[in-house]
Image (tube, coloured by chain):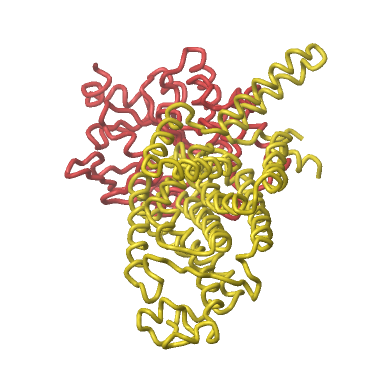
Amino acid sequence: MSLSHNNPQDFVLAVEGLTVSFDGFKAVNDLSFYVDEGEIRVIIGPNGAGKTTVLDLICGRTKATEGSIKFRNQELTKMKEHQIVHAGVGRKFQNPSIYEDLTVFENLELSFPRGHSVFGALTFRRNAEVIDKVTEIAEMIFLSDLLHQRADLLSHGQKQWLEIGMLLIQDPALLMLDEPVAGMSVAERKKTAELLNRITQDRSVLVIEHDMQFVEDIAHRVTVLHQGQLLSEGSLERVKSDPKVVEVYLGH
Amino acid sequence: MNVMKSNLFKRQDLINYGLLALLLLVVLPLTLDIFRLNLVGKYLSYAFAAIGLVLCWGYGGILSLGQGIFFGIGGYAMAMFLKLEASSPEATAIQSTPGIPDFMDWNQLTALPWFWEPFNSLGFTVLAILFVAPLFAFVVATAMFKRRVGGVYFAIITQAIAAILTILIIGQQGYTGGVNGITDLRTLMGWDIRSDSAKYVLYFFGVAMLFLCLLMAHLVLKSKLGRLLVAIRDREDRVRFSGYDVSNFKIFVFCFAAMLSAIGGAMFTLQVGFMSPTLVGIVPSIEMVIFCALGGRLSIIGAVYGALLVNAAKTTMSEAFPELWLFAMGALFIGVVLAFPNGLAGLYTLLVDKFKQRRAHSSAPANRTSAPAAEKEQVDSSSGVTAPSQS
């Protein structure tokens, strides 16, 4: 570790002493970790380890009981969800959450970062810039031919891609993905890994994933959670050979 | 410009508005006597509230069981102005205090209450009709939605407010006319609104206002805000993570619905000639939801037909079997929700689709290429959502 790592300003995300307690049960307990600019970090851990809760805390869905989350030196724990989005944090949920009564185009258009106030939404014009951007993203997520399809008619994998596309159009500096390949066929999984490799070029990414093959493909570093606490951290090789990790997670 | 226009109003939309205009402006005035036409005007005043509910409930998913509140605010504002005009010192010379509304005199009031004073001015009254209801809606909606109270809780709160307001109006007889409401309204700026000719004028004015409100609602729904409302209805949580402050949009649409409802209330007072607490409370508020559900909660035009049909049925039925009407309406509501959740408008769209499909099939192969496009357009419009224009 270099000296500069002691300065939180160098991290895109600095989580320190994060604790959340639900009726006395500490789902996340005094957790600290740091994500570098441009890093792809994967969070692994057994069920109930608090992985999804950590993402919920970062994106503002759950309020922290204690601790701090700094994104590029902005304190996120005091901000509302939409403010966190505008600060540059995007989140993909575990189950594809898209707007099923709208078309693929409209789903992407709503995520386009303009016209987010009431007045802005009333006067929003679907101009060439919007159409170009939506078309470009649709191409990346393999949905070019389905732009005017209602989203509830998409397959599970296509819904996952659409949600990734909705994030991409927001152009977040920190992208958080909760099990992006869960429930996908082998072919879809491969395509998704390809897609993720492409979109993670110029941003930091925080991924929760169980599929170890997939983790190996994408992870720069791995954080292992267990019972809401940090169990181990480092390169996948290092984490894999950590006896504590083998015991609680990889051993089964 | 042409592209823009075809985006805002599709051909089917124009046909639907045209049919409604034909019915309201030509067919009904030519076939009904003025008594019946005036009744239609009264029914249409409920349609304003029903249109608001389409936006608020059908699209935004916010069920309000208190649109009567706003209907009442608009109606009472109009009635207060008309009542003051009818209570000139000459007209009320026999009262112990001439120059104040008769019910105040009966309740031993000796001066006009301060909040009645501004209603001497027509300009203030119009502003009050347009803005008091949305302002009140803003306070209620902000208190609720900013705290993320919604769904059933919101519906119950709106219903409670409707009940409270009714009780308040009835209790404060000297200030509000109590349970009788504000009655015996005669002239508007010296023009006798009880004459047949005035009733014709007011009917057509009401229809014009209705189309103005339809146009505003149409534009809101065709903007990105319309699509956002659908997104909020289906996945409110997710919309926050697309970067929107959801509560602001819910507040906006609730205020907009309140304004439409208040305009309807004012039109009611003008055409019917009185305003009373029976139009404010829980029962009329729920009836408005039924108009909207029956007409089709995703169709603003459907809401107009819903208000017309249910009220026509109500008048007919309650003339014949007064005690059966409420049961009939309850049964109607349950039946509609079970059989066609998108109401009459849903049924209509289905029929239009079938007709178009059949026509497309019979005129194959010349029209073959256009058939799938027309079909797709219908899928979009039945869901109430615009298809993006590819220009």
Count up the numbered dots.
0
**Chain assigned red:** A
Specify the quadrant that holds the C terminus of chain B: top right
Establish if B43 lies above or below B15: below
Q: Quadrant of residue A109?
A: top right
**Location of residue B120 in the rendering, given as x and y in whole percent from the top left corner:** 55, 79
Specify the quadrant that holds the N terminus of chain B: top right
**Chain assigned yellow:** B
Establish if B302 lies above or below A79: above
**Location of residue B119 in the rendering, given as x and y in whole percent from the top left corner:** 53, 76
Q: Is residue A169 left or right of residue A27?
A: right
Residue B118 vs residue A219, the one in the foreground: B118
The residue lying at 42 percent from left, 58 percent from top is: B280
Residue B331 vs residue B194, the one in the foreground: B194
**Location of residue B258 in the rendering, given as x and y in whole percent from the top left corner:** 50, 57
Residue B64 vs residue A32, the one in the foreground: B64
The residue lying at 65 percent from left, 23 percent from top is: B353
Evaluate whether residue A217 shows in this view. Answer: yes
